[in-house]
Each structure stands twice: as structure tokens, then as C-alpha cells.
Image: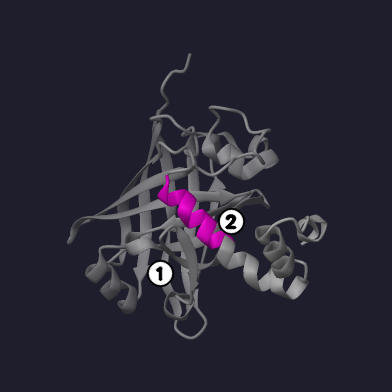
Amino acid sequence: MLMARLGTRENWFNQMNRLLFQGETLSRIGYPPMRAMRNLLLRAKGVPKLNNLETNFEKGAPLFQKIFGEDWHKIPPVFHAHYAPRSGTSDRVKVEGTLDVKVSPLVSVMSRLTGALIPYSGKGVPVTVTFWCGEDGNSLYFDRAFHYADHGTCHFRSKMVHTGGNELIEFIKFGIGWRLTYQWQNEKVILKHRGYVWRMFGLDIPIPLNIILGKGYAEETAISDKRFHMWTHANHPLFGEMLHYTGEFQITEVKCETTS
């Protein structure tokens, strides 16, 4: 708005810019769709986002060091290993453990139809989770393998994309994503719900999926340098818990490529 007021009136573009953005109301209405169109065109041309606000981030550091910020140096060693994959590398981490899983009938049906989320409940289900960074240096891939005794192995795969600060979006299939923040609080890693989105043409459009799935929440607590406890759930205000699992994991493999 300030730039529009300071701009000259020498040509039709500057005059139009001054007309559109010199007032606060028109600026609030007009800027978001213009910004969305700009981002769409840049994405179509393959132009990456600028990371000019991350000048203090150490090159080759773990992606989650950027997400936790100063708290990275406060969290226990097990989480340094858990979140070890570095941006732009082939680093890979594996954790193994058992979970008590509770899935509502609605989530079970949705999972079987779409191949996303978790389809079955169970006690002491062996689970293997493998995760690694994407080549763009801004995302983390998860492959969760639930080894059910009576249903075989079911995979729950997702992709977490860092969107700035301590906020990410965890995408499952069809471009559906859960916005969340990572925080180090009360000696725990806490994942807090920030809503659901649907990614279309590079835009993250908010959707009211919480009326079906409720709000998600998760915690991770260190047990030792190699073990941690975690629990997560999606809670609906009317229907109660839609998804819940809790248990312990051990870091079983950390593969970090050497850098020169």
C-alpha cells in the first residue's frame, strides 16, 4: 500500500497500481488473488521459492533443525537421531516398535477406499517407520508399515512439507494435507493441529475436513538416547476419537551420507 502511494503516475500500469492499492480495503481484497496467481505462474515455470529469510540456517543441517530453531539444541539425543535426515541428501532413518491402534469405523472405511491413513485397530501392532528428505530439501517422506497378525502389512505413507517457521503440511493421497506445528514444550515434542488443506495447482486451499475427522494432536517423549514414546489422535467434538495410537519406538538405523 505504501509503495502504491509513493509510486509515480507516469504510465497506465503505475496509475492502475496506485488506484488498486492506495486504499486498505482494496489492498486486502485484491492482493491475495494476485499473489496466488503469481505463485501459480512461478510454479508452472519451475521457479523455486526464495529462502531469503533463512540466512542463519546452516547448510547441510537436518531439515528439522530449521523447524525447531533454537530449540534444536535443547531436545534430547534420541530426537536428533529421529530427525537426522539433512536437506538435499539421501539420509535415511528407521525406527521400530509396537503400537496400540484404535480406528473408528468411519476412518477404517475411508482408509480402505482411499489407501490412506490406517484401516485396522489392534493391540501391540509391530510398526516400522522409515523416513528420508526429499531432493528439494524442504520435505520429509514417511513410510509407516503396520504389521497386523491377521491383515498382513499395511502401509501409511505421507509427505511433510515445510511451509515456514515451525509449520508443516503433512500430505497423504489426492493432495489432502494436515497443517501442523512442531514445538519443544514441557520436555516433549508436540504436534499441534492447524487445519486441513487441499493442494490444487500449487495452492493450499483450506477445507473443513475437521467436521469428519476432527482435530489431530501428537506427542513424543524421550525414554533414552535410542528410545521414545509417542501417541497421537484425531478427536471429533461429537463422535469422540476417530484415530488413536500409542506406543514406544527404538532408533534402529541412521544412514547419513558423508559430505566433503
Quarter of the image for residue 119 reads bottom left
Disc 1 versus disc 2: nearer the observer? 2
Tell me the tag on residue 181: 2
Q: Is residue 43 magenta?
A: yes
Q: Residue at x 37, y 47 (%)?
A: 142
Disc 1 from disc 2: Cα separation: 19 Å
Q: Residue 218 in the image: x percent, y percent?
A: 52, 59
* Coloring basis for residues: one colour
Q: Residue 163 in the image: x percent, y percent?
A: 55, 51
Highlighted range, magenta: 35-45
Q: Residue 31 in the image: x percent, y percent?
A: 64, 65
| Kind of residue indicated by mark 2 | Thr
**Foreground: 228 or 243?**
243
Residue 246 horizontal side relative to residue 104, left or right: right
Tell me the tag on residue 243: 1
Q: Residue at x 47, y 43 (%)?
A: 47
Look at the numbered disc 1 and give the secondary structure of its residue: strand
Residue lying farthest top?
Answer: 260
Q: Tell me if label 1 and label 2 are in contact, CB under 8 Å.
A: no
- Mark nearer the N terminus (1 vs 2): 2
